[in-house]
Image (cartoon, helix red, strand yellow):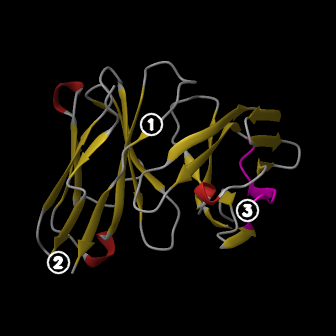
Amino acid sequence: EAGVTQFPSHSVIEKGQTVTLRCDPISGHDNLYWYRRVMGKEIKFLLHFVKESKQDESGMPNNRFLAERTGGTYSTLKVQPAELEDSGVYFCASRDRDFGNTIYFGEGSWLTVV
Amino acid sequence: QKEVEQDPGPLSVPEGAIVSLNCTYSNSAFQYFMWYRQYSRKGPELLMYTYSSGNKEDGRFTAQVDKSSKYISLFIRDSQPSDSATYLCAMISSSGNTPLVFGKGTRLSVIA
């Protein structure tokens, strides 16, 4: 069974540009999460989808970040325009519908804004 | 005060040593406690998962939760060089729809 897959694995963009990160969760997992780790800090929650609906987006830092999950399958996280402080690693995770199951993380998308 | 405190280390031990990793937390609503292992440039991988207080053992790994002290531990027996990684504690409330809250992670090196 394929795990959580994220694209791109690494991205270097200039300040002001746009970047779109993609996450393919484990097939059949209704719950999809985005987390972020910036340098020297802990991994922090960004938002949670249940199928195509945003369950909780309290961790989104500002309106430069837009997440979508059309059709309840893959998700995208767009940063527009990117700022230097957006640099870090963006993790996607997924979980089956029944709580108590494992939350599986992808390998992350490493973003550097220069 | 951070919700979850974890000493970032680094922690360096000789092969075969017993390793003790710890986290404290402030939110009494946390009911599920996890330990993730993260190798360099990889995503977190779930190691241990404990509900409420008590101990859980899996091979060389033992997780302990003391809710009265708001303190969790991960013990690694007979540590191996392959255990060298960053260990992250994470916790979640019982509702299941609240996000995981992570500690900063402790970087462990096991020296052969």
- Amino acid of disc 1: Tyr
Rendering quarter of residue A16: bottom left
Is residue A77 visible in the rendered image? The answer is: yes
- Amino acid of disc 3: Glu
* Mark count: 3
Label 3, label 1: how far apart the Cα atoms are: 29 Å
Along the line of sight, the residue nearer the viewer: B58 or A62: B58
**In the image, is residue B62 above or below residue B38?**
above
Residue A104, numbered circle = 1
Residue A54, position as x, y percentages in the image: 32, 35
Range of magenta residues: B14-28
Q: Residue at x 69, y 65 (%)?
A: B1
Q: Depth-wise, is mark 3 or mark 2 nearer the camera?
A: 3
Q: Residues within 10 Å of mark 1 (few under 14, many from 20)?
A: many
Q: Chain of mark 3?
A: B
Q: Depth-wise, is mark 1 or mark 2 nearer the camera?
A: 1
Q: Residue at x 51, y 44 (%)?
A: B45
Question: In the orientation shown, which residue stands out farthest toward the bottom?
Answer: A114
Residue B15, numbered circle = 3
Along the line of sight, the residue nearer the viewer: A35 or B57: B57
Q: Residues within 10 Å of mark 3 (few under 14, many from 20)?
A: some
**Label 3 with label 1: CB-CB less than 8 Å:** no
User: From the viewer's perspective, is B53 left or right of A63?
Assistant: right
**In the image, is residue A28 above or below residue A90?**
above
The kind of secondary structure element at disc 3 is loop
The kind of secondary structure element at disc 2 is loop
Residue A15, numbered circle = 2
Q: Residue at x 74, y 53 (%)?
A: B26
- Amino acid of disc 2: Lys
Q: Is residue B18 magenta?
A: yes
Q: Chain of mark 2?
A: A
Residue A26, position as x, y percentages in the image: 33, 29
